[in-house]
Image (cartoon, rainbow, N blue to C red):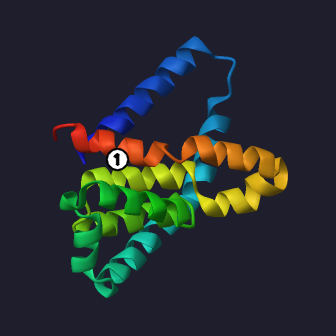
Amino acid sequence: MLIAYLTVVALLMVTVLAGHRHPEVEHRQVWTLGWRQLRPLLVRLPVALVAASFLAELLPQEWFATVLGSTSGMTGILAASVLGGVLPGGPSVSFPLVLVLFRAGAGTPQMVALITAWSVLALHRVLAFELPMMGWPFVWRRWLVSLLLAPLAGTIAMLVPW
């Protein structure tokens, strides 16, 4: 909660500083645009968190703790990388689900790998955007060079002392 308050204070300080350094910029327009982008999230995020909480009760937590737990090591990191690559949806869906997995006993390195794979590999985004716009020659090359990023991030997170 402290981080949220510090973020708001930092945002206000940067806003005041920007207002003094660039008086020609219409800051009211910037705030209006920011509010317009934030408003849908204020509805989606609580709904997604509640849905993820219900999902947490339906999923076998012992299984997730075994497969994605901190003791699962590289096997868990690889499983999380695959899961992250095929996990559909935007951050409003994915992050509450990651939170549920984390609370069910998934390890930090495994969740780092999952989020990295979701960010970089995202099969649903590849099929919906990259493939139609960029074509197979680009997509397979990008995937080839990106496949190691999620397991590498999870491995580094496993090596970092917490």
Q: At x 45% / y 71%, what residue is drawn?
A: 48
Q: Which of 107 and 74 lies nearest the eye of the viewer?
A: 74
Dot 1 crowding, Cα within 10 Å, few <14, some 14–19, many 20+: many
**Residue 144, x across and y down, in percent:** 61, 45
- Image quarter of the C terminus: top left
Q: At x 23% / y 39%, what residue is drawn?
A: 159
Task: Inspect this view and state whether residue 151 appears.
Answer: yes
Q: Which of 10 and 150 lies nearest the eye of the viewer?
A: 150
Q: At x 21% / y 58%, what residue is drawn?
A: 70
Number of numbered callouts drawn: 1
**Residue 94, x across and y down, in percent:** 47, 63
Q: Which of 81 and 10 lies nearest the eye of the viewer?
A: 81
**Left or right placement of residue 69 versus residue 98 in this view:** left
**Left or right placement of residue 136 versus residue 84 in this view:** right
**Residue 24, x across and y down, in percent:** 69, 18
Residue 100 lies in quadrant? bottom left
**Left or right placement of residue 130 versus residue 81 in this view:** right
> Which amino acid type is marked by label 1?
Gly
Image: 71 above or below 112? below
Mark 1 sits on what residue? 154
Outermost residue, bottom side: 58
**Left or right placement of residue 84 versus residue 89 in this view:** left
